[in-house]
Image (cartoon, rainbow, N blue to C red):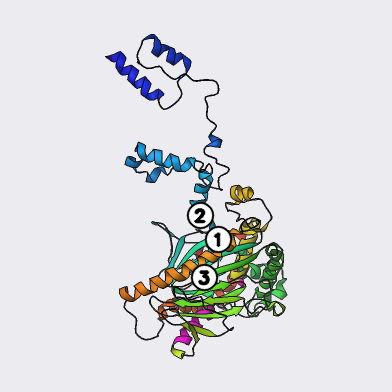
């Protein structure tokens, strides 16, 4: 009985892998199995490359494709399910590579700073956002009450989220000639500003978003340049420096423009385009600055500015499209004019209601002068995103940069993807709007809550007053260690 039990165990274990000659001879000698045991020949091994081709893995991606944390035991041990899956896999020898692409999410941006409480939702996981936090495709970024957030995307776009705002960073797609970014504003107010290749004009004035200052990125701060200027002076010159209104501004702007010139060489190789939408409007373009506000089951308000130089002006730099299952109507908005869609997204009209314009302008004015944020953007581009704009083959992009290089030569995949996005977005959001009418009560009036910006405004004016206090002047006399500690304390 024991011999038979051992034989069964041996046989069951051998059924999962090849049986060598010594083992089969032993089974035959004791006549443990009635049927003959398959003997392994010299050419018995299967070439797995011909069955399950696995060309390369993306940077940071596991070689093993099994999702051990989410396996259903019943399905895992179901032989019939295995046979079905095997048939599907056998029909396409490149299934592993396609599976890697479908289940890999590329980095779409990085956090410059969160003021207050900011969260990122990745599936069911919730994480806090802070300086240097990475944002990937599919992530939802949320700012809580009395909070705000600055983000830089891989194409150099700056995004500012006001309080009570939710935004999905959906896709970044890269070809040899273009970087394309897809995102959705779910709720709230954002400033979405593409990177311009033009130098920034020096202004001897305070910044307009001081609530974020200082940044943890030391080299971006005006205080960094104030210290360098002050410590290079002799005693008499330091006395004169005491009366300078905005110390460090000139050096900071020069450094910013120096970075812009250098980084322009990177961006010459690829253009950047975006597709950004709310439930009732879509925006497609390049080199544009947009201020957009949307509140659930209300209109979308937006302001557009063209970032092209005068000799590069284009009438179709931004195209706005509407909702409706068969509505393919579009419009090209005028610059510096506030527009409002109707709630169902069928048209966009100019409007002049002071009750609405005033808070919208207040939120827009935060971004009038932001050299520190722009310098942080240029530093991050040079450090983290430069290689995305160099000429490399697809395998290098995947293994070293963690991105899929879209094919333009053969099938022009990106053009087809854009066409699908436009059609799919219009139809799905139209359906969503129809459903929202039944689920959400239509708000009364047009007033935009001050909660979207009052905390940032309060902090801005508080920082403006503190600029001329003695404590602020002490920063210029700090050594590197003291300045670093000061940043850690004040740059949270």
The answer to whether 58 appears left or right of 226 in the picture is left
Q: Quadrant of residue 345?
A: bottom left
Q: Is residue 87 above or below residue 369?
A: above
- Which SS type dominates the magenta stretch? helix
The answer to whether 219 appears left or right of 25 in the picture is right
- Element type where label 3 sits in the image: strand
- Element type where label 2 sits in the image: loop
Please tell me which residue is depicted at 53% across the width and 55% down the height of the picture: 106
Q: Earlier in the sequence, mark 1 or mark 2?
A: 2
Q: Is residue 366 magenta?
A: yes
Magenta residues span: 356-371
Q: Which mark is residue 453?
A: none
* Of the pair 119 and 65, the residue shown nearer to us: 65
* Of the pair 339 and 135, the residue shown nearer to us: 339
Is residue 64 something that shows in the picture?
no
Query: In this figure, which residue is indicated by the disc labeled 2?
Result: 105
Residue 89 horizontal/vertical position (percent): 47, 42
Query: In this figure, which residue is indicated by the disc labeled 3?
Result: 276
Residue 446 horizontal/vertical position (percent): 40, 85
Query: In this figure, which residue is indicated by the disc labeled 1?
Result: 172
Q: Residues within 10 Å of mark 3 (few under 14, many from 20)?
A: many
Q: Quadrant of residue 25?
A: top left
Q: Residues within 10 Å of mark 2 (few under 14, many from 20)?
A: many
Residues at marks 1 and 2 touching, judged by CB atoms closer than 8 Å: no
Q: Is residue 255 above or below residue 398?
A: below
Please tell me which residue is depicted at 39% across the width and 9% down the height of the picture: 29
């Amino acid at each position: 009985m024991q011999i038979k039990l051992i034989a069964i165990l041996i046989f069951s274990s051998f059924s999962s892998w090849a049986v060598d000659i010594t083992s089969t001879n032993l089974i035959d000698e004791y006549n443990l199995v009635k049927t003959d045991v398959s003997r392994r020949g010299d050419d018995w091994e299967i070439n797995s490359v011909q069955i399950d081709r696995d060309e390369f893995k993306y940077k940071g991606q596991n070689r093993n494709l099994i999702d051990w944390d989410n396996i259903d035991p019943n399905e895992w041990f179901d032989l019939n399910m295995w046979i079905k899956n095997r048939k599907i896999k056998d029909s396409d020898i490149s299934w592993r590579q396609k599976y890697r692409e479908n289940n890999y999410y590329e980095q779409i941006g990085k956090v410059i700073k969160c003021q207050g409480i900011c969260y990122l939702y990745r599936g069911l996981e919730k994480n806090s956002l802070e300086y240097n936090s990475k944002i990937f495709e599919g992530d939802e970024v949320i700012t809580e009450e009395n909070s705000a957030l600055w983000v830089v995307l891989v194409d150099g776009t700056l995004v500012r989220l006001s309080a009570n705002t939710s935004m999905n960073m959906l896709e970044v797609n890269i070809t040899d000639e273009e970087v394309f970014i897809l995102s959705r504003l779910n709720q709230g107010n954002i400033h979405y500003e593409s990177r311009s290749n033009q130098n920034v004009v020096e202004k001897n004035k305070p910044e307009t978003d001081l609530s974020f200052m200082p940044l943890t990125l030391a080299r971006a701060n005006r205080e960094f340049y104030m210290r360098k200027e002050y410590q290079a002076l002799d005693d008499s010159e330091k006395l004169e420096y005491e009366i300078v209104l905005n110390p460090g501004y000139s050096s900071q702007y020069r450094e910013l423009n120096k970075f812009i010139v250098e980084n322009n060489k990177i961006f010459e190789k690829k253009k950047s385009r975006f597709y950004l939408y709310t439930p009732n409007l879509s925006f497609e373009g390049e080199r544009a600055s947009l201020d957009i506000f949307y509140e659930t089951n209300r209109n979308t308000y937006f302001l557009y500015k063209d970032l092209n130089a005068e000799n590069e002006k284009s009438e179709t730099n931004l195209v706005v499209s509407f909702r409706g299952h068969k509505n393919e109507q579009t419009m090209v908005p005028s610059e510096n004019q506030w527009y409002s869609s109707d709630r169902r997204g069928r048209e966009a009209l100019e409007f002049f209601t002071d009750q609405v314009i005033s808070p919208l302008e207040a939120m827009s004015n935060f971004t009038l002068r932001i050299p520190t944020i722009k310098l942080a953007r240029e530093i991050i581009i040079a450090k983290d995103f430069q290689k995305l704009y160099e000429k490399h083959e697809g395998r290098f992009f995947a293994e070293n940069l963690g991105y899929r290089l879209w094919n333009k030569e053969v099938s022009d995949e990106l053009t087809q993807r854009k066409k699908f996005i436009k059609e799919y977005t219009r139809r799905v959001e139209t359906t969503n709007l129809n459903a929202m009418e039944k689920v959400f009560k239509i708000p009364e009036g047009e007033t935009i809550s001050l909660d979207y910006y009052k905390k940032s405004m309060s902090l801005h004016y508080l920082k403006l007053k503190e600029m001329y206090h003695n404590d602020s002047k002490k920063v210029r006399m700090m050594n590197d260690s003291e300045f670093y500690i000061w940043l850690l304390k004040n740059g949270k």
